[in-house]
Amino acid sequence: MMHHVSMRSNPKSRKTALAAWTTWMSWRFSVRSTTSGSSSGPDSLHRTQELSSDSCEKPPHTPVMLKEVLHYLDIHPGQVVLDMTFGGGGHTKEILNTIPEVTVLALDRDPAAFSLAQRLAEQHSGRLQPLLGRFSELEALLLKMKIKLGGVDAVLLDAGCSSMQMDQSERGFSLSMDGPLDMRMDGERYPNMPCAADVVNALDQQALASILTTYGEERHARKIASAIVEARSVYPITRTQQLASVVAGSFPAAAIYARKDKLQRPSHVATKTFQALRIFVNDELNELHAGLCAAQAFLRPGGRLCVLTFHSLEDRLVKRFLKGDDLSTLHQRRFPRRKRGEVGEEVEDRKKDGQNVHWIPLRRKVIVPQMEDVKENPRGRSAKLRAALRC
Ligand SMILES: C[S@@+](CC[C@H](N)C(=O)[O-])C[C@H]1O[C@@H](n2cnc3c(N)ncnc32)[C@H](O)[C@@H]1O
């Protein structure tokens, strides 16, 4: 009954909420849903296996900046490599197929990716060791396997989510396909962890706006949060396309595709909302920080790290971590501008200043994909690669 009271108190908002609800309902009945049911259980693993079982099929995820990653990791025969984000296994497969006698420890928090890694491990007797868990659980997992601190030669962290996750509508990551509003990368492991629907239906307007601002860098966060609160007072928001309609409903029709992505293609006005919810639901930035700390602990001196990121929040965090900034005090101080000159000189200067130096960048500038690679794999268009050597 609560929602009727709030709707009666504000006829304008009632109109907006009803408009969003009507769009959503008419969409539901006019378009055949691509999927139904929930993401949990062995079903989703089965679908992932189907996706990859035929070697003639498109790989479940096209690895981003493969040449560049292999170049900067500079892996030698017999070395131990840690792939912290196995995903569809694109980077790992290339490492196993091109460098003799390497051992790859392959982590992923998603049980579907872990199951793919287990299948690949069967073809590479002992050279691939799959690990199921989050970056924040990695230290315990590696110590349990008797991997010592400083015992790894190269680490790859390819942040964000995989095409396997994005393309399965029942995982709820994609705004272009209808599915349950889930977005959890490891909901199967932690079924009680809140999903995106829990977030949009439970948090108050201010908290929602703050999530959209912080994790989506969304300029219209307050307007969108208000539309969500009004819409859910009529009907809980449980589907991806329903949320996309609610967000779209708070903008004039001409604005819905007015934003452009990096390739100047029209981008839906709810894209940043989806990004923000995904980051929040999976605690991605804290996880990324935990992953970088684990890489720092397990890489040997002289070992190499490659980190691929896909939006500015991630890249900023990686850049500052590699510089040795204390990330817990980021908001309290302004960082001095980088000095001109050689990277090596700069590291020496910082050591003289008594700063903790754990990393030497292998390239001063961030590395971005080649245009032809972006054309072939547009999902990699916003990738940024940072490569560094452990001191
Ligand atoms: C971009 S995909 C990796 C793709 C992979 N490099 C390939 O070539 O197929 C990112 C993967 O990292 C996993 N992931 C994201 N955050 C994680 C975390 N905190 N701990 C472990 N795995 C994580 C996701 O589940 C996803 O499978």
Image: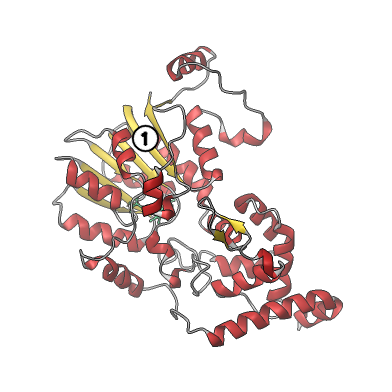
Front position in the image: 369 or 191: 369
| Quadrant of residue 113 within the rendered picture | bottom left
**Quarter of the figure with the C terminus:** top left
In this rendering, would 29 be left or right of 56?
right
The residue at label 1 has a CB less than 8 Å from ligand 1: no
Q: Amino acid at mark 1?
A: Leu
In this rendering, would 242 be left or right of 220?
left
Residue 228 position within the rendered picture, expressed as x and y whole percent measured from the top left: 69, 69
Residue at image point 44% right, 37% down: 293
Residue 264 in view (yes/no): yes
Residue that numbered label 1 is attached to = 305
11 lies above or below 334? below
Colour scheme of the picture: secondary structure
Residue at image point 20% right, 42% down: 103
Residue 74 position within the rendered picture, expressed as x and y whole percent measured from the top left: 27, 32
**Quarter of the figure with the N terminus:** bottom right
Residue 13 position within the rendered picture, expressed as x and y whole percent measured from the top left: 79, 74
Front position in the image: 255 or 328: 255
